[in-house]
Image (tube, grey):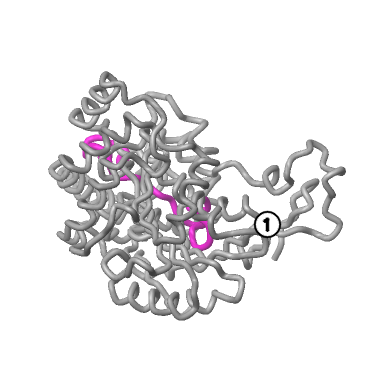
Amino acid sequence: MFRALGGTGLSWDWGRACYTPRKGAPTLSQRPNGLRPIIEAMPFSKIGQVAMAGLGDPDVIPLWFGEGDLPTPDFIGEAASRALRAGHTFYTFKRGIPELRQALARYLEGLYRRPLSAERIIVTSSGMSGIMFMTQALIEAGDNMVILSPVWPNINDAVTVLGGEARAVALEPTNAGGWRLDLERLMAACDSKTRAIFVNSPGNPTGWTMRRDEQQELLAFARRRGIWLVADEVYGRIVFSGARAAPSFLDLAEPEDRIVVINSFSKAWAMTGWRLGWLVAPKPIQDVADKIVEFNTSGAPTFLQHAAVTAVVEGESFIASMVERCRAGRDLIVAGLQSFPRIRVAAPEGAFYAFARVEGMTDSLAFAKEVLARVRVGVAPGAAFGLGGEGHIRLCFASAPERLAVALDRLAPILR
């Protein structure tokens, strides 16, 4: 099934979840605005479409974005101030300052009990910058990336921008409101033009977390086929099993494996506005890292990197408190949602979202706008997260219990 986009020369292919050229697409000289049609055709963020109607309104309880209500802890902010006063405001190493790369290598060695060289660390200007970095390194026109869905939509758009195909494979919903992976279906979606498989675990928006045996099987498949694995592990520390971290491909991968692990300071350290992340990558990516960073950001801000060293070295107690805060928010939100007859939702294994199916609801964007207008609670529409997302809403529970309780009270009339 296709959806044509008037004036752009593109159609949306629902089966492949990407834009494809139509016959008779305009040539460069025929573009009305001189812009790439694929860029003009890309829709505005569905989460943004909801949020723009209520952003800044003090009466709205905003559960739409992927951040909580805690500011960055003082010990990290003070480290940034010290770095500024010390004059760390100049250009620096494109892959990141040596102190931060070394600190991250030690941190990951302690977390996963595997040796890891600082040479494998590449500091990026946000987790999203890391995603775009990897997509630019791996995907060109005609290639495809197989992506587990529902998923944060930016990865699909990054592939589309480069002229590739974002090939979605949906997790399967369970009767209890949870999710499971059909590995055979995921592997069957790969063909001769598949350059990478993208896995986000713990997942945004579902909270689904990949098991160790599933990782082992997927890694073996990728090795056999020479396909890259791109693992988004931004929520790797926010898990509710009692473990320090979710299962990671870093537990399994050899330094030469075609695996890139993407991470960020945004979630576990409450540093969303800092726009700072990192990659763990093998030598082929290391060899081109300086070039791609140069063409995108020329490197993350120096004084922020010095503060990030403090976050990594001194942040374990804060991360533990963040996880417990999210656990309390999860238990409160999930129990509240499960009390509504229209809702199907399970307690997520990781991340900080409840991804709830609303029985009888088929247009989640319109529904999220209605929720905002009627009860002043901001939720994200499930359609924003691609294949398997429609019919759901996402609520971020990384907020104070008092705020979440008020949100549930407000939602009751519309979700019953």
| Mark 1 Cα-neighbour bin, 10 Å: few <14, some 14–19, many ≥20 | many
Considering only vertical position in the picture, is 335 above or below 143? above
Q: Position of residue 251 (x, y in %)?
A: 26, 67
Spot occupied by residue 196 in the image (x, y as percentages of width and height): 51, 66
| Residue name at image x 45 percent, y 57 percent | 285
Q: Position of residue 74 (x, y in %)?
A: 20, 28
Q: Position of residue 170 (x, y in %)?
A: 48, 67
Q: Can residue 341 be seen in this view?
A: no
Q: Viewed as shown, does residue 337 lie left or right of 19?
A: left
Which residue is more in the foreground, 77 or 122?
122
Circle 1 — which element?
strand
- Closer to us: 293 or 197: 293
- Which quadrant, please, contains the N terminus? bottom right
Magenta stretch contains residue 389: yes
Q: Residue at x 82, y 42 (%)?
A: 31
- Viewer-side residue, 9 vs 363: 9
- Circle 1 residue: 19
Does residue 362 appear in the picture of this structure?
A: yes
Residue at image coords 52%, 53%:
383
Q: Is residue 382 left or right of residue 86?
A: right
Left or right of 313: which side holds 222? right
Task: Give the residues drawn in magenta, as a range.
Answer: 382-409
Amino acid type, label 1 = Tyr
Residue 36 falls inside the magenta stretch: no
